[in-house]
Image (cartoon, rainbow, N blue to C red):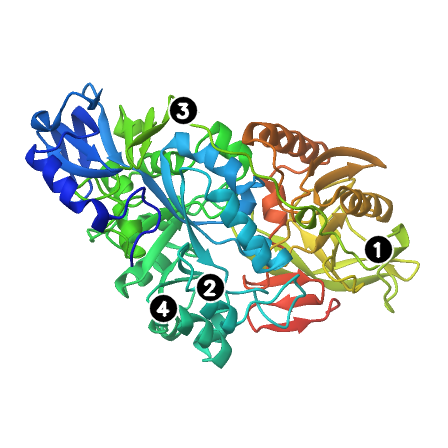
Amino acid sequence: MSNKFCKVPLWECSATLSAVAMGRVPAETVITDAKLVNVCTHEICEHIDVAIHSGRIALVGDARHCIGEGTKVISADGAFISPGMLDGHIHIESSMLSAGEYARAVIPHGTSGIFYDPHEICNVMGLEGVNLMVKDAERTPLKAMLTTPSCVPAVPGFEDSGSTITSADIASEMKRDEVVGLGEMMNFPGIINSVEETHRITGETLKAGKIVTGHFSIPDTGRALNAFIASGIRCCHESTRMEDALAKMRLGMYAMFREGSAWHDLQEVSRSIRERDIDTRFAVMISDDTHPYTLCNDGHMDHIVRRAVSFGVDPITAIQMVTINCAQCFQLDHEIGSITPGKCADIVFSRDLNDFRPFRVMIDGDVVAENGEMTVSFAPYSYPESAMHTMHVGETITPETFRVPTEKQGSATVRAIEIIPARVGDYERHVTIPVKNGLLESDTEQDVLKTFVFERHHNTGKHGVGFVKGFNIKRGAMASTVAHDAHNLLVIGTNDEDMALAANTLIERGGGMVAVRDGQILGCVELPLAGLMNPMTAEEMSEKVGALSRAWEEIGCDIVSPFMTMALIPLACLPELRLTDRGLVDCTKFCFSPLEV
């Protein structure tokens, strides 16, 4: 697969690179006296120079003969240099930032490339939304490598999204230079049961010679996992147990160890390499979802490397997992992922591998960040009005909307979704709750809250009803249009009045996340861009998200990143029980379940 993201393609500059290496042509830039983190051989090489020309590496070793009158010399002064880091699976939209502001936030942390799946905006706006993300990202130095959304909606027949992606769409998208593969194939039932259209989607990707990325979230490491991998799916980020990751690597699948703002799987899944003497070439670390507070206060892939080291992963191994392993997964290791001749000059400077904190970042041979700040600027980008007005809820929402009638008297037993803090899974629980005046009500004593999902794309007036457990809310309500993956309007609360206020606040503001109590808005993050993002900077959004987090605490919630955990309640490809605008979905049998038991 050719790389369309470097400054100059290799075939154009190969003769020049050879001339620079031989000393016939001076390098444009030479880095001197560095400790090279050699990800090819898992070693540190001392007193290394790197000669750069045309955005690529010409020589690694002694580069004194490559320095000419116009050569820019950068002394590393004995600091470590390692390849620019790659995030092998990320949804930019989950940062709540536009693509450009996301790039501005992650580059100073040493991220030179991302493999992004914009299926969030695609579920709202279709391929038009994807194209807007591409245009926003391409003006930045970040190598934004697109994996075209594969599952829109995530699981057909169980929810209503704003768009639909077909195999014909995929065939067309695979011809684009920006596309390096297919976004996560979430419809694993369709894959393992040989559904024709699902296999056409992966087939069009394979036909184009590009990478199919996966999402296999069930614990079957036998016939189902084999069936999934046999279809051509190369990697998966949904391992939550050590044995999941180990089974995938043993079958030649790249196991992507996730450590996001809310999903903390790394400590458990990294046991697969920490507790066994195995080759780690199939281990990759990714973020999946990272909100702006994490990006501003902790970092991006550098934060994940530090976390891995704190859990006992060897520092060089950790760096391999965010560089060469990821590049090999996407069959781009001939272009990126290592500091070796011919590769893109994406280089990160740091002083301590055990506390990995980049202080200088180069992309394509240019210094783009120093000491945590961007050193280059790029042109502004404005999204069209159509992307800023995507709330189309087909019913007037009042407190009466949230009444849940029942024929039972006194009490009733209902199915409830119990969340698991810092995990993507949940549990189906059967809970007996009070019936008042013929209506099912929230029961804060048992931490069971009414939950509604409203279709918000086509004015259909549909909504699904359920109950959720685990947020510890005593009074108030929360609402969000970040509700994976269809991103309909999700509302949870203790009382109908606050639920109506939360819902209508987001309808009026074009989407976002809000927490209310006793008729007062305690915190709100406006996300007018597709109901998912805001064009503000990461710092500005971090302040808003911080204020929302404090509002959640005020109403009783004590879990990490509650709004991100809340956003998974409608995701009908994750076990065990989910709620969409069409109703409760049993995600172990893939059928609808009645509310009452």
32 left or right of 88 in image: left
Whichever of labels 3 and 4 marks the residue nearer the N terminus, that label is 4
Name the residue at 79% across, 61% down.
459
Whichever of labels 2 and 4 marks the residue nearer the N terminus, that label is 2
| Quadrant location, the C terminus | bottom right
**How far apart are the two marked residues, 3 and 4, measured between alpha carbons?**
37 Å
Residue type (three-letter) at the residue carrying disc 3: Thr
Name the residue at 27% across, 63% down.
252
Local crowd at mark 4 within 10 Å, few (<14), some, or many (≥20)? some
**How far apart are the two marked residues, 1 and 3, measured between alpha carbons?**
51 Å
Residue type (three-letter) at the residue carrying disc 4: Ala
Reading the image, the residue beneath label 3 is 375
**How far apart are the two marked residues, 2 and 1, measured between alpha carbons?**
41 Å
**Residue 185, how many percent across, how many down?**
46, 65
Name the residue at 74% across, 49% down.
492
Quadrant in the picture for residue 125: bottom right
Reading the image, the residue beneath label 2 is 173
Residue type (three-letter) at the residue carrying disc 1: Phe
Reading the image, the residue beneath label 4 is 208
Q: Is residue 506 above or below residue 295?
A: below
Regarding mark 1 in the picture, which secondary structure is present there?
helix
Q: Nearer the viewer, mark 1 or mark 3?
A: 3
